[in-house]
Amino acid sequence: MTTTYRPLTEQEAIEIARTIEGIFPEGADLKSREIGDGNLNLVFHITDPASGSSLIMKQALPYAKVVGESWPLTLDRARIESESLILQNKLAPGLVPQVYRYDAALALTVMEDLSSHVIMRRGLMDTIDYPLFADHISTFLARTLFLTSDLGMNQQEKKLLVRDFINPELCKITEELIFDDPYTDAETNNIPAPIRDAVEAIWQDGELQFEVALLRQKFLTSAEALLHGDLHTGSIFITPESTKVIDPEFAYYGPMGFDIGAVIGNLLLNFAAQEHWSSDADARARYRTNLLTMIESIWTQFETKFRALWNEQSVDRLASAAPGYQDFYMKRLLQDTIGFAGCKMVRRVYGLAHVADIDAITDETVREKAQRLALAIGTALIRGNRQAETIGHVIDIVKKEGF
Amino acid sequence: MTTTYRPLTEQEAIEIARTIEGIFPEGADLKSREIGDGNLNLVFHITDPASGSSLIMKQALPYAKVVGESWPLTLDRARIESESLILQNKLAPGLVPQVYRYDAALALTVMEDLSSHVIMRRGLMDTIDYPLFADHISTFLARTLFLTSDLGMNQQEKKLLVRDFINPELCKITEELIFDDPYTDAETNNIPAPIRDAVEAIWQDGELQFEVALLRQKFLTSAEALLHGDLHTGSIFITPESTKVIDPEFAYYGPMGFDIGAVIGNLLLNFAAQEHWSSDADARARYRTNLLTMIESIWTQFETKFRALWNEQSVDRLASAAPGYQDFYMKRLLQDTIGFAGCKMVRRVYGLAHVADIDAITDETVREKAQRLALAIGTALIRGNRQAETIGHVIDIVKKEGF
């Protein structure tokens, strides 16, 4: 066993890959390709061209490079990612990559190769239809959230999970880049010049900041369930038939709505960006209608599955016995979801990290229109989150803002 | 150093006491008296009659005896108690006993002797006036809660404290005995026969159970601040001049209102019990008025001090910048406080553990009247907690229910 951390070479990666049982034939001629972006992790794609077998090795680097700057980042995130994947695979089988091995000393996770899938953000930019996604992601969300909450697991064991998934460094990134910096003239913001007026209006908007402060406090204090913590469409590998949620290094115990809102917010960012990606107006309208149907279906199926788990597997006597509590809980969760979806959208328009859906639009006028639409939808979701009664509230906002 | 746990003998306690620096003169003839109740902890009172110096040694036992039954209980609670006391003494100097030493292997805390003080519950039963208590306890609450919250301390360091104070076994006691068992026909309940009708009415009261379910969820998930976790009047040593909060073995990161509500709920239990303890009607009315003034003053002073800390020492930019957020936060905290105060009262009337204020009333009719009054106030606090706008809401309820 390796006992000290060092970034692996491709040859070392191959040697480790050989020791994983049941993947490669004895004596296979393995190839390695480093496919990571080099900012946070090394990612080795190890293949045996002869048998077609393959696997992925992801090694955390002890620093992060963002906008050219380097800051130290805990290797513990590899443990958090690996343990999350293993737990999620137990709770929602088949919806995350299988982990073959976790090596703590090397901060290395060896896992299932998903290169038959594409990153969902890319797929959406190509307007590919994913008819099973709402079913898959609602199952993932309902099962991972319910079964790690006080409703669905032993409340004392849950506290030990809270402890294991304390994740200060990665949470700090979210706390600053999603729940603070976009609402003030912070250096980290990356503001497209044409929409500066809209951004400055947000900095002056006390009502909006009040709602964000409430959502921020939930992110800081509400240990409801083990979240993925970064569930945007870049954290989902997909085909029309299969969905795999990846990269849970931001996992921690937080408010359930943050994960559900991340999915919905990112679908709405793609919605806003469809000004460009489908230039045919009819096709664009159809695609957008499909996206809204998908969003509605994600919540509706999530709610159905979550309530079914509650009715069948609750471990909380009072939560099940108190009349009206489940309805109240689901409504509040919807409201959180809507508020967090809005926060996820706003930061992706002019915060530190944007999304390709919008930024890859080459026509400046079209890009600005997409940015303004994303901001309008995002701020409306934040502003109205505590008044929402049904998922129709989201659809109404989107239609009102520019469909 | 001792390396294995064993319950200490008095002679061993004396030998350890000699090694604490700065307390006893060289060669002092120390006496030890075991003064614990023998259920959870050994408590040695070590004195040097010649110099008058003394200290307390509290050793956790690996089991709890409650209603004759023995169940295993983690020795880790000694660490939690000791670390809490040390932290509280930094944040609110002089309001908790000073810790001289903590020995992890022995689950032993050596600390300041407070035998010049009395247990506040006893003092209140003797209708002693404590004119400084509201000032002292509001300082303790404002400083320990604010300065361990995301408002008052670095949010990444706070997460490490959350981890250190994960306290599953002691939290389980609260979750069951306060937030579950009283609301169903649980075996642990200890129901006085004369009020069985009132208890059964609570078991049928869906509206009440709904509110308790909400409060229970806050206890399970809201990691707002490091709580004392068991702040009843039996956890307070007091004189008219001095207040010392003791026994924080239930400490964990939870909702702030739980600590404030514990204090107020226990004062109201004493209020209800004053049917007996002051048999002179005028004296009783005066004493009760004083108690209500004390309760009002605890909240008012707490709020003033908490807001001052917020305005002067906030580390949360957005929480301070968002217009109206502080007012909203304080109102919600008051509402939590009122709800938790009610829960604390209800369980002390017919749950597993009662309070001496009520149970020591010898006249059955008077005792029943006190029990019914405590239940009426407690359930009204729970029922109305989310509508409360000011602390006057509590006073109004008490006056309406039977003053």
Image (cartoon, coloured by chain):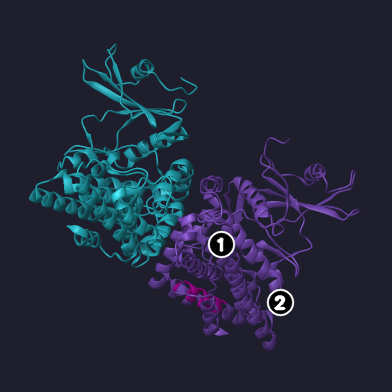
Chain colours: A cyan, B purple
Q: Along the line of sight, which residue is nearer the eye, B375 or A246?
A: A246
Q: Mark 2 sits on what residue?
A: B127
Residue A329: x %, y % from top left: 35, 61
> Could you tell me which residue is drawn at 56 percent across and 62 percent down?
B311
Residue B375 on the magenta segment? yes
Q: Quadrant of residue B284?
A: bottom right
Left/right placement of residue A219 relative to residue B21 reads: left
Magenta-colored span: B371-383
Which is the main secondary structure of the residues drawn in magenta?
A: helix
Residue B279 on the magenta segment? no
Left/right placement of residue A160 relative to residue A331 reads: right
Q: Earlier in the sequence, mark 1 or mark 2?
A: 2
Q: Quadrant of residue B88?
A: bottom right
Residue B311: numbered disc: 1
Q: What amino acid is at disc 1?
A: Asn
Left/right placement of residue A318 relative to residue B174 reads: left
